[in-house]
Image (cartoon, rainbow, N blue to C red):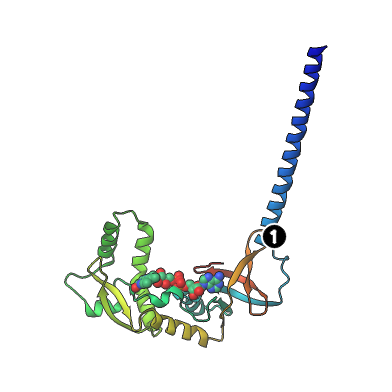
Amino acid sequence: MKRKQVVQSQQDINTKEREQGMRKTLISRFVKYWMVLLACLTITPAHAASPEFTDEADVVVIGAGSSGLSATMTLLQGGVKKIIVLEQNPFPGGTSNVAEGVLGVESRMQRDRYLGPPMLTKDMVFKREMNYTHWKGNARLMRKFINMSGATINWLQDMGVPFEEVSQTTFDGVRTWHIVHEHGKGLIKVLFGKAKQSPNVKIMMETPATRLIANENNDVVGVAAKGKKGEIRINVNRHAILTHFRV
Ligand SMILES: Cc1cc2nc3c(=O)[nH]c(=O)nc-3n(C[C@H](O)[C@H](O)[C@H](O)COP(=O)(O)OP(=O)(O)OC[C@H]3O[C@@H](n4cnc5c(N)ncnc54)[C@H](O)[C@@H]3O)c2cc1C
């Protein structure tokens, strides 16, 4: 009889533990379900927001630093008709304002002034840079960057960026560093001025982008931003370009 009672109480305990276990699982599933639901809400499907103001653009560029403004100018030159640039600060330029010069190899300016010998080539600089980093850097990316660097300097110069001199950076000793008059600020002044002049570009200062809006296929279809009076939502027809996007 005693043994029966022990077995019975053991069974009761087992049942209780099972029930408790099931309750725990159910609670944790419930919590997880709500966590997933909340996460889905912050990803924000296209229909969810009810913004105070809706705008539309072919491309939205987030950040009016040297990357964002260069992208804007490239889009303009490619014939894009409506670009919106969002900048969180009351001034353009971000970190680019404190840079001094831009690396370039085989630029017009470099060729004109420093023909050599030895003639400075893309191959030479590529090898120097990779040796400097013990070939730990991304060689393909470095190659692409160096290959395009001279043409990029020419492109900036053609737009009116005032380069003063091709100087040496401290570590490689070769003349690749294209110094801009007034440094980074000088470069931003030109790019920002050009973008502002264009009727195809709308620049919204003090308007930080807060999130991307995706449709059911996870394609980005819009950008939400914090406007002065509330949320702004911009429908993007083609692309959103993020440069140093921080929220
Ligand atoms: C002291 C110093 C000196 C340097 N010197 C050189 C140099 O001589 N040569 C060189 O090649 N590099 C130099 N660099 C590095 C160079 O400055 C950066 O690599 C370059 O500025 C990056 O440009 P960017 O456009 O990507 O970013 P940024 O110039 O920082 O622009 C990003 C912009 O995005 C905006 N932004 C961010 N989040 C949001 C948001 N959510 N919504 C809206 N806007 C947003 C920011 O306000 C900013 O205006 C230097 C860096 C430092 C700190």
In-image side of 188 versus 126 (left or right): right
Front-most of 133 and 20?
A: 20
Front-most of 107 and 70?
A: 70
| Residue at the (66%, 58%) spot, across then down | 217
In-image side of 90 versus 47 (left or right): left
Which residue was labeled with disc 1?
41
Return the x and y of residue 66 as percentages of the image width and height: 44, 75
| Residue at the (69%, 52%) spot, across then down | 35
Front-most of 45 and 139?
A: 45
Q: Secondary structure at mark 1?
A: helix
Work out whether residue 67 can be spotted. Answer: no
| Residue at the (69%, 60%) spot, across then down | 41
Return the x and y of residue 5 as percentages of the image width and height: 81, 17
Q: Amino acid at mark 1?
A: Leu
Quadrant location of the N terminus in the rendered image: top right
Residue at the farthest right position: 1
Front-most of 239 and 32?
A: 32
Callout 1: few (<14), some (14-19), or many (20+) C-alpha neighbours within 10 Å? few
Quadrant location of the C terminus in the rendered image: bottom right
Taking the image in four quarters, ligand 1 sits in the one at: bottom left
In-image side of 51 versus 183 (left or right): right
Return the x and y of residue 126 as percentages of the image width and height: 29, 62
Residue at the farthest bottom position: 197
Tell me the quarter of the picture where residue 119 sits: bottom left
Work out whether residue 46 can be spotted. Answer: yes
Tell me the quarter of the picture where residue 178 sits: bottom left
Return the x and y of residue 227 as percentages of the image width and height: 63, 77
